[in-house]
Amino acid sequence: MPLDFPNIVPENNLRLPDALTIKHGPARLLARFILEGDKAAREVGVRLRIRHDFDELLYVNRQYSTSNTWYPLVDAFNPECVNLTPENAFWISGENDAGEIVTTRITRVYNWIDTNLEEQARAFWYGEDHGQPCIVTAEAAKLISGVVAGGAAFWVRPDFRGKHLSHWIPRIGKALACARWPIEWLFCYISLAQVRKGLAVNYGQKHLSHSVFYPGSSHGEIVLAYTAADEFYDDITDVVASRSTAKSRAGMSSVPNFRVQPVTNTSPEGVRQGSISLS
């Protein structure tokens, strides 16, 4: 399904601030948030770049998935299985001082004006819908419609974990998507283990809906995490304000005090298992 909305494609592998072109959304807020996110990453030794050389993402993924520090990319985000282009997707590359990639996240934009995630769940996972096994019980999957941004492949190398990158990288991916396209919904899949750890809040997602199953997959039950665009703008407004307040206090860290807020569950809890990282 082609994307009907033209967008300006940045040159590959630009520094994060240089890759930002704002055509949609609140321009001042998005610009300020991106600049603050870039600074926050540099404060912990990570330089962020925006890329659309998806083969490189696959190469890095394969390096680390063989050492069990990352899951292999699912087919829908594997450039050998699906047509990822600079017009419909991008990925964030975070590098340390030695130029090694230590964090990633991919964003794919979909034109679902006449459909929704419930109908597109196979394509979102497998890349193409050929009637593969798929069970959607998440009621909110019907809501995810229009021009939407799906996130995946968020990963942080073990030696860079605990540096608040999970607060910034997924939000930066969402902000870039909202700046280039008229996004209505932002969503990802999260494992039950990650939900219980509160990572949906870390990623800036506001709602959870149980569940999506891909029988035969090793990932088990997956939770849909989603946020409306207006809710996302409120979220990053709070992030920028919190970081500004922290920096203004003498002797205090500039890491913002991310408020832990309840995430809305739209379906009941049950017996759940499995693990995935598709934020």
Image (tube, rainbow, N blue to C red):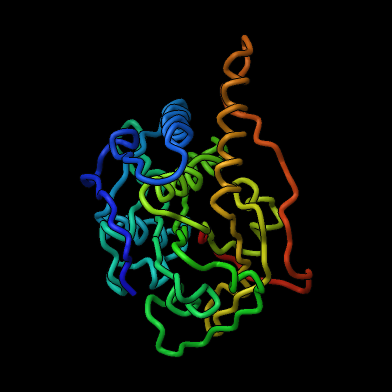
Query: Percent position (x, y) of residue 164?
Result: 56, 37
Locate residue 28: give its quadrant: top left
- Residue 246, compared with residue 68, is above or below; it is above
Quick check: 16 above or below 66? Answer: above
Task: Say which quarter of the image contains residue 65.
Answer: bottom left
Foreground of the two, 155 or 117: 117
Q: Position of residue 222 (x, y in %)?
A: 61, 70
171 or 60, which is in the foreground?
171
- In the rendered image, the vertical position of residue 34 relative to residue 90, given as above or below: above
* Residue under the point 55% across and 80% down: 214
- Image location of residue 235, percent across then percent down: 60, 41
Quarter of image, res 64: bottom left
Point 27% across, 71% down: residue: 80
Toward the bottom, the furthest residue is 131
Q: Quadrant of the N terminus?
A: bottom left
Please provide percent x and percent y for residue 225. Answer: 61, 60
| Numbered-mark total | 0
Taking the spot 60% from the left edge, 27% from the top edge, the residue there is 241
Q: Closer to the camera, 192 or 211? A: 211
* 10 displayed left or right of 93: left
Q: Is residue 256 left or right of residue 278?
A: right
Residue beneath the point at 60% across and 48% down: 231
In screen coordinates, is 161 left or right of 182? right
Outermost top residue: 250
Vertical position of residue 250 compared to residue 242: above or below: above
